[in-house]
């Protein structure tokens, strides 16, 4: 699609975002049900993976009458994606050239591959355009934002380069560029909001603080992709005066929730995604009780995500109420999810951890990994392989050594260990993709 067609489609989606931001909870629910029925019919007819899974579970399309009935469908996991993707989850109608094949990047410590159709891509761009963000935040924005993101081709963060390459070049900078260059861009284009990963924003804030330079102050600082803890928030607020808001999303589903402006949690953008919280037995967790996040993406037909549990995040629905502009959307408490450390080099340079995690993402037999920095120039990579025959014979050590030395320098000592599992980080339910014991 060309620029004008893309722009028109984004505007069309933006109009519906505006409508839903002002709709009643009943109107949103009836929209959800309509979309859900449509998606279920589509997935059953066109995606063998779902048809087989639902047939085995004894659930038919006639069983989906209300939103509650979504719970009758079996959940799908990241392992399902890894084993079947992208061939049996993808639908016949959407060939590659009509959309994007995306890979999860960055902080997850295991990778998956997802296909989005062109409509889904453009709807996501609309959902995070400056006008939409201004509506969610209750702060009218009159100007474009700026993003510091992973900009590799198959990252969800690179969608803008696919749809609007010229504009993207002016407003998106790679997280791997030197922090000075990121700050220079911020000062040059003076965006209304700045969006990036907490790990990258923390680096920017540290450089600003150390050098004492003055910077352009965006109205909003948006964090995404990793958990933003209270320490990080404080560090950001000591440098950025704009309000800090968290955006919860994932490559598998797109943007799913936006932080409440009264600080009560995250509002599910339920016109585009259904979020459930379930306990270990698969039952709905009552409000206030923590469980697993299960997401259904109402927009993507190229590879439908229906009851996807693979994000691996823990959360609960809030028992609180708020009166912010998103109060008609369900309210989640803070999501407990991904955390990630930066790496410190001998010359005190900070390497953004995604540089290393991206170097692991095409190693398909790797089920899980963790990169550890034990001391300056001393690294260990833990790998959990899957059970495929390829995994038993394939040696990835040389490839990993070479890629890591390209990033970390020839002096780096890199030990690679195959293990049976990687334990979660202390105080969390998830393992960290990158851990460093070196103080920045
Ligand atoms: Zn709110």
Image (spheres, helix red, strand yellow):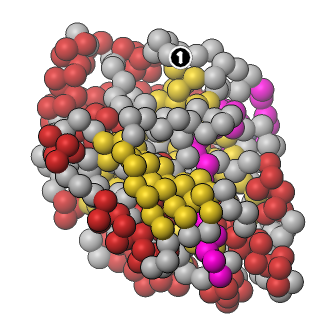
> Residue 429 in the image: x percent, y percent?
58, 32
Look at the image and tell me whether residue 37 can be seen: yes
Looking at the figure, which quarter contains the N terminus? bottom left
The quarter of the image that holds ligand 1 is top right
Q: Is residue 356 left or right of residue 259?
A: left
Q: Which residues are magenta?
A: 320-347
Locate residue 99: give its quadrant: bottom left
Q: Which residue is mark 1?
A: 279
Looking at the figure, which quarter contains the C terminus? bottom right
Can residue 346 be found in the magenta stretch? yes
Look at the image and tell me whether residue 298 can be seen: no
Determine the secondary structure under disc 1.
loop
Identify the residue at image location x=31%, y=59%.
397
> Residue 275 in the image: x percent, y percent?
51, 32
Q: Residues within 10 Å of mark 1 (few under 14, many from 20)?
A: some
- Vertical relation: 86 (above or below) 406: above
Identify the residue at image location x=36%, y=14%.
72
Magenta part, dominant SS: loop
Locate residue 290: give its quadrant: top right
Identify the residue at image location x=33%, y=19%.
73
> Residue 435 in the image: x percent, y percent?
59, 53
Locate residue 148: give its quadrant: bottom right
- Vertical relation: 252 (above or below) 15: above
> Residue 428 in the image: x percent, y percent?
63, 35
Between 436 and 177, the residue placed more toward the observer is: 436
- Vertical relation: 162 (above or below) 76: below
Identify the residue at image location x=52%, y=20%.
278
Between 63 and 377, the residue placed more toward the observer is: 377
Q: Is residue 434 left or right of residue 290?
A: left
Can residue 19 be found in the magenta stretch? no
Q: Is residue 283 left or right of residue 401?
A: right
Q: Is residue 425 left or right of residue 91?
A: right
């Amino acid at each position: 699609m060309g620029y004008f067609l893309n722009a028109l489609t984004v505007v069309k989606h933006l109009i519906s975002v505006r409508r839903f931001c002002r709709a009643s909870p009943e109107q949103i629910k009836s929209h959800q049900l309509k979309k859900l029925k449509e998606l279920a019919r589509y997935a059953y007819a066109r995606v063998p993976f779902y048809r087989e899974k639902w047939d085995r579970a004894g659930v038919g399309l006639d069983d989906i009458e209300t939103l509650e009935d979504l719970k009758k469908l079996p959940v799908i996991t990241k392992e399902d994606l890894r084993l079947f993707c992208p061939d049996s989850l993808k639908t016949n109608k959407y060939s590659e050239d009509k959309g994007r094949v995306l890979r999860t990047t960055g902080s997850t410590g295991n990778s998956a591959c997802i296909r989005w159709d062109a409509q889904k891509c453009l709807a996501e761009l609309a959902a995070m355009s400056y006008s939409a963000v201004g509506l969610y935040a209750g702060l009218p924005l009159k100007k474009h934002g700026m993003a510091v993101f992973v900009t590799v081709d198959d990252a969800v963060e690179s969608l803008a380069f696919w749809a609007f390459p010229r504009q993207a070049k002016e407003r998106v900078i790679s997280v791997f560029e030197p922090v000075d260059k990121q700050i220079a861009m911020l000062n040059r284009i003076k965006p209304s909001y700045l969006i990036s990963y907490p790990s990258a924003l923390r680096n920017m804030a540290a450089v600003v603080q150390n050098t004492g330079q003055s910077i352009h102050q965006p109205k909003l600082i948006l964090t995404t992709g990793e958990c933003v803890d209270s320490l990080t928030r404080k560090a950001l607020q000591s440098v950025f005066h704009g309000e800090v808001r968290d955006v919860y999303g994932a490559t598998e589903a797109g943007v799913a929730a936006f932080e409440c402006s009264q600080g009560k949690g995250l509002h599910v953008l339920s016109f585009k995604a259904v979020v459930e919280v379930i306990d270990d037995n698969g039952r709905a967790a009552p409000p206030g009780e923590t469980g697993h996040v299960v997401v259904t993406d109402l927009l993507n037909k190229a590879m439908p995500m229906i009851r996807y549990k693979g994000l691996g995040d823990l959360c609960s629905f809030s028992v609180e109420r708020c009166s912010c502009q998103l109060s008609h959307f369900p309210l989640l408490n803070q999501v407990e999810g991904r955390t990630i450390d930066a790496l410190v080099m001998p010359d005190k340079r900070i390497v953004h951890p995604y540089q290393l995690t991206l170097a692991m993402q095409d190693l398909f037999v790797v089920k899980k990994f963790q990169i550890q920095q034990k001391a300056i120039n001393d690294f260990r990579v833990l790998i959990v392989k899957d059970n495929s025959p390829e995994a038993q014979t394939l040696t990835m050590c040389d490839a990993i050594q070479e890629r890591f030395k390209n990033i970390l320098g020839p002096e780096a000592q890199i030990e690679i260990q195959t293990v049976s599992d990687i334990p979660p980080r202390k105080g969390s339910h998830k393992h960290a993709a990158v851990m460093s014991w070196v103080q920045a």
